[in-house]
Amino acid sequence: MKKNSISNPDVSVFIKFMDKGFKLSVPADQERYYREGYEVFIERVEQHKSKKNGYDDIEAIGLTAIECLVALQRMREEMDGLTEAFQGRMERIEETVTSAIES
């Protein structure tokens, strides 16, 4: 197979912060997450900048990044709790089914 006939599973996503632009090569199936995430991130940065005693660009970007990390940590803890609850339910179901089969 020729090199130029192999499909490239990556797509380009352009992200701009202040006066810097970044062209990222991301998996095609994740492109939407990068684009949507970037839009939400920029909206939140603008909210921080527009507050009464607004933050400058760097401060707003930093605060938004920290908020994103905290949200990820919170979601991870919630997911872990849900996984534990699901596993507990599966164990109870297995015990009930085993008990029903044995009796």
Image (cartoon, grey):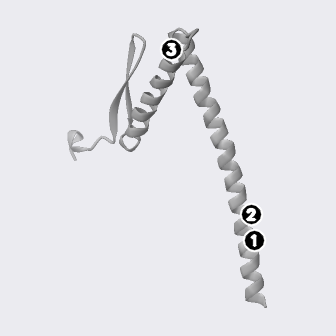
Position of 69 with respect to 13 (left or right) is: right
Image point 35% across, 29% down: which residue? 13
Question: Foreground: 7 or 68?
Answer: 68
Label located before the other in sequence (2 or 3): 3
Query: From the viewer's perspective, is residue 99 above or below residue 36?
Result: below
Q: Is residue 7 left or right of residue 26?
A: left
Q: Residue tagged by mark 3?
A: 50
Mark sitting on residue 88: 2
| Residue neighbourhood size for the residue with mark 3, other residues' Cα within 10 Å, grouped as few (<14), some (14–19), many (≥20) | few
Residue drawn at (45%, 23%), measured in percent from left and top?
42
**Exactly how many numbered labels are in the figure?**
3
Quarter of the rendering containing residue 14: top left
**The residue under label 1 is which amino acid type?**
Arg
Of tags 3 and 1, the one toward the viewer is 3
User: Is label 1 in contact with label 2 (beta carbons under 8 Å)?
Assistant: yes
The answer to whether 59 is drawn above or below residue 44 in the figure is: above
Front disc: 2 or 3: 3
Query: Can you give x and y, in whole percent of width and height, for residue 87 in the image?
Result: 70, 62
The one of 11 and 46 positioned closer to us in this rendering = 46
Q: Is residue 54 above or below residue 10?
A: above
Asked if the residue under mark 1 is in contact with the one under mark 3, i.e. CB atoms within 8 Å, the reply is no
Which residue is outermost to the front? 52
- Distance of label 3 from label 1 (alpha carbons): 52 Å
Single out the residue that lies furthest toward the bottom: 103
Residue holding disc 1: 92
Residue 76, image x and y in percent?
65, 42
Where's residue 34, x and y in %? 42, 34
Residue 86 occupies quadrant? bottom right
Q: Dot 2, how many residues are within 10 Å of its Cα: few (below 14), some (14-19), or many (20+)?
A: few
- Where, quadrant-wise, is the C terminus in this rendering? bottom right
Dot placed on the residue nearer the N-terminal end, 3 or 1: 3
